[in-house]
Image (cartoon, helix red, strand yellow):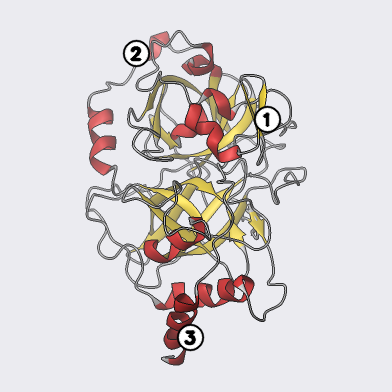
Amino acid sequence: MTSAQAKGSGPGWQGACVLAAALFWLRPPLLHAEPNGNTTDVCGKPAVSGKIFGGQNAPDQRWPWQASLLYLGKHICGAALIDAYWVISAAHCFQKYVFPMGPAAGTVGEVGGKQSGEGARVLAQHTEETGDYAASHDRSHEPSDYRILLGYHQLQHPTEHSQQMTVYRLIVHDEFNKRYFMGSDIALLQLHLPVNFTSHILPACLPGPTTKLPPHSSCWVTGWGMVTEDDFLASPFQLQEGEVGIIDSEVCKMYFQSPESSSSEYSIHEDMFCAGDLMTGKSICRGDSGGPLVCKLNSSTWFLMGLSSWSLACHYPISPSVFTRLTYFSNWISEKRSTSPNPDPSFAPPQEKPPILSDFTSLGMVHKPSTCITLVSSQTFLLLLISLRTL
């Protein structure tokens, strides 16, 4: 998770970014209204209320649903606990090409042994073996290759509250990346055994399909991802947090358009939304993929509204981050959970000791389009200036 301070103003697109940031807070938020009533007393209520690029160290117990997704023993993505048997993450965390040979992929990924200059497009060549991988023969998608870590604050220092869970079933949305770039970027993981809820491990509340955010909602992203495009989170790998604002989709689209065109293959669709803090510079980065964006509703309950999905490179100037919109997938989540009975605990593998993590060189990517950051047009400047004059 990264953060950058504004480095000057004046004419040009850098000044437009600052103005756009102000406009984002003036425009109506992307989502509007009341939380779903199908929640329990335990979800979304941490004991503590309380650096993702531009982030800061998160207090212990503040985000008890935060999970680390391990692949062959290494942290690759974030995830979120949604009930005793289920964890949710991003679909792209389970694609072959998220795990290039050699150093972790940034804007350059490795596909089939060949270098690609467009890190975001690595995903476009993803495997067609999507869906339920419970019976998969592809070793890169075996549920047994994955682990879920819960109750961690510092990944290098597990405590008596930490738990390592094995994965029984992996369900990746079968429309992932098929209709458009990064569409349906969502996956569910069913655990062999139920999680023991404690003050350090609690689920986030899930929104219903009509759940909306009131104006000026407090939303936060969390993760153990890189702190810049080139810098890993320092030992002891303490969870990072950053407060972000919801960004209007039409405004957000401008950041992913080519300067020569009004269209782009990287766009914002109804199953996505944008968020960020462009004034202080907060965005998701590699290793944050699949992690939670939560918003406080009813003044006391945190709802899981988004999953970290993709962004431009996490360095100055900061652009909006794109998240999977969970209200869009509410019915899909309910259907998959209702048709997947809990596994027989007698067939669960032996419980494993929570590991001490020290190697972050295989982080999964937050996918980044290689297209140029959009140049904000003169018409946009006028709109920004008019909006600012109404303050």
- Alpha-carbon distance for marks 1 and 2? 33 Å
Q: Is residue 157 visible?
A: yes
Local packing at callout 3 (Cα closer than 10 Å; few below 14, some 14-19, many 20+) is: some
Q: Is 68 left or right of 187, judged from the image as shown?
A: right
Query: Which residue is identified by label 2?
Result: 344
- Closer to the chain start, of discs 1 and 3, is 1
- Alpha-carbon distance for marks 1 and 3? 44 Å
**Residue 385: assigned label:** 3
Local packing at callout 2 (Cα closer than 10 Å; few below 14, some 14-19, many 20+) is: few
The type of residue carrying mark 2 is Asp
Local packing at callout 1 (Cα closer than 10 Å; few below 14, some 14-19, many 20+) is: many
Identify the secondary structure beneath mark 3: helix
Could you say where residue 182 lies in the image, as x and y percent from the top left? 43, 40
**Residue 362: assigned label:** 1
Q: Are marks 1 and 2 in contact (CB under 8 Å)?
A: no
The type of residue carrying mark 1 is Ser
Identify the secondary structure beneath mark 1: loop
Q: Is residue 150 visible?
A: no
**Residue 340: assigned label:** none
Tell me what residue is drawn at x 75 percent, y 46 percent: 230
Q: Is 40 left or right of 262, judged from the image as shown?
A: left
